[in-house]
Image: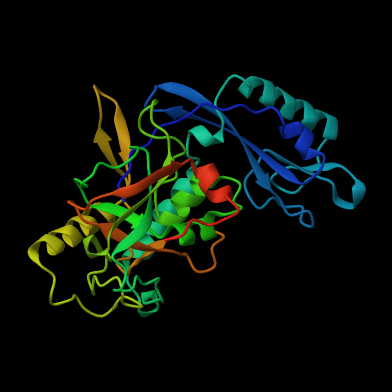
Amino acid sequence: MPHAFAPQPGQVNFVLLAAFFRPICFERACSTNRIKNVDLCTLRMFECCTNSARPISPCEGRLDTCNGKLHVCNQKGQQVNVRRKLAVLAANLLFCAGCTTQSEFPPLDLRQYYENAIREAVVRRPEFAVPLRSISSDRAMVSVATFTEWGVPSTPLTRNTWVSLPEQLHELCHGKPDSILAIQQILGLPPMPTPSRPDHQWAVVMFTVPRDKIFRPCPGGTDIAAPRCSAEGVASNLNDTMTRFFLSQIWNSDRIGFTTQGNGTVSFQDFGYPFTGMGWSYDWNPASPTHIGVSEYVVSPGASVKNVSSMSPDQFCSGRTAPTS
């Protein structure tokens, strides 16, 4: 599901206070924003294990409130001077106060998780044939959702549009603290917090389309009423258009490390995608036990679009009532 991305500003003003109430790891990481050609100073927070002297993520330091006592450990698990460490952390906060935060530049570990997902998804295995949400043939119109920065889609659609069932996407992102990252992980999209243009915004757009304009992105069979995709062979009834679609999808998904030339001399990271080809998105959240995301579908060009509504990711994921399809 191709999307373009770029960074967004943020503020950090609550980190030291939070450190005294629960275990927090701090990591100050500075990197270069190749798009704006300026240094980005990021301050990151990690949950740490209170029962271990060793942080679960590399940090400059860790503040724990184990057994009611405040102590600080360095990366080697050695206790260090609390006052000195707090002074260093405070200095880091002041230094970064006018800079950008983690949300504006994807940290290395997120990119690594994402690239690992591409490597994992590319090798099809028998267990990839999982139960899928099916859309019965007695439905003339279907309500779907797409995650996009490009606003409300035109009608009729001018391109293949990747969608999911709204209630399933809501079910998986509901309650997540970072709704944008959660949706990107669930849908198998790159970890970028802001769109490609400063005047764009991420949104979950819902609309209804004719059922006969929807297909399942599975070379083993595109029938959206089927309970699962075949992991064994390519369907014999694929036409030339569908064959080209799958070839293009595989070619553009199964890759990492590419860059695309933008305006002037600026280069942008050109992401691949963890495309399973089995009718479900690869959820690259490292905490996901199965990495099975949503059942995914594609709406063909020419489909008429009706009943359009748009919500911010926060509004969509935090809603008490799940949208229905």
Task: Count numbered badges in the picture.
Answer: 0
Relative to the observer, which residue lies in front, 20 or 177?
177
Asked which quadrant contains residue 289, the reply is bottom right
Q: Residue at x 29, y 31 (%)?
A: 267
Asked which quadrant contains residue 89, the reply is top right
Q: Is residue 275 above or below residue 180?
A: below
In the displayed structure image, the side of residue 304 where residue 77 appears, left or right: right
| Spot occupied by residue 118 in the image (x, y as percentages of width and height) | 36, 57
Q: Is residue 239 visible?
A: yes
Q: Residue at x 23, y 59 (%)?
A: 250
| Spot occupied by residue 225 in the image (x, y as percentages of width and height) | 31, 74
Q: Is residue 274 visible?
A: no
Rendered-image quadrant of the C terminus:
bottom left
In the displayed structure image, the side of residue 201 where residue 269 appears, left or right: left
Q: Residue at x 37, y 38 (%)?
A: 149
Residue lying furthest left in this view? Answer: 240
Colouring convention used in this rendered image of the protein? rainbow
Asked which quadrant contains residue 26, the reply is top right
| Spot occupied by residue 127 in the image (x, y as percentages of width and height) | 40, 78
In the displayed structure image, the side of residue 309 where residue 110 appears, left or right: right
Relative to the observer, which residue lies in front, 23 or 237?
237
Q: Residue at x 13, y 64 (%)?
A: 243
Residue lying furthest right in this view? Answer: 68
Relative to the observer, which residue lies in front, 175 or 289?
175
